[in-house]
């Protein structure tokens, strides 16, 4: 699992493109994933589906909307539209 997390494309960080879940957490938030705030962790999860589409560390409305969908999913307030709903359209408000 650790090896897989180290190979994930995470998008653009402060010093350019970042590969690795833990590396992006350290780069963006100054701490490993287990030591960051819940909202910061949701940001990392949100970019996994399309790392080039979302901009961590900015006021990215699309990223905020994706985090909100993930938050609703985790709270049990919605369900995806089947197994292929990677964008969580079933969790739109």
Image: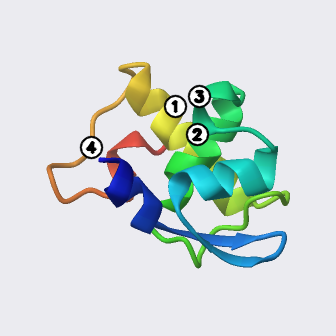
Task: Choose top left, top right, bottom left or bottom right for residue 60.
Answer: bottom right
| Mark positioned earlier in the residue sequence (3 or 2) | 3
Please state if 46 lies on the left or on the right of 54 as rendered. left
Which residue is labeled 3 in the image?
A: 34
Q: CA distance from mark 3 to mark 4?
A: 26 Å
Classify mark 2: helix, strand or loop: helix
Task: Give the percent coordinates (x, y) of residue 91.
Answer: 40, 41
Classify mark 1: helix, strand or loop: helix
Residue at 49 percent of width and 41 percent of height: 69
Q: CA distance from mark 2 to mark 4?
A: 17 Å
Q: Tell us which disc is closer to us: 1 or 4.
A: 1
Q: Contact (CB < 8 A) between labels 2 and 1?
A: yes
Q: Which mark is residue 80?
A: 4
Which residue is labeled 1 in the image?
A: 71
Task: Give the percent coordinates (x, y) of residue 21.
Answer: 53, 54
Q: CA distance from mark 3 to mark 1?
A: 18 Å
Which residue is labeled 2 in the image?
A: 42
Q: Contact (CB < 8 A) between labels 3 and 2?
A: no
């Amino acid at each position: 699992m650790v090896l897989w997390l180290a190979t994930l494309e995470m998008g653009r960080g402060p010093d350019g493109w970042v590969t690795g879940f833990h590396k992006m957490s350290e780069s963006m938030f100054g701490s490993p994933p287990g030591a960051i705030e819940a909202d910061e962790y949701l940001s990392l999860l949100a970019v996994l589906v399309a790392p080039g589409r979302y901009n961590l560390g900015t006021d990215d409305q699309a990223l905020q909307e994706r985090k909100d969908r993930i938050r609703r999913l985790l709270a049990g307030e919605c369900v995806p539209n089947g197994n292929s709903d990677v964008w969580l359209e079933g969790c739109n408000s």
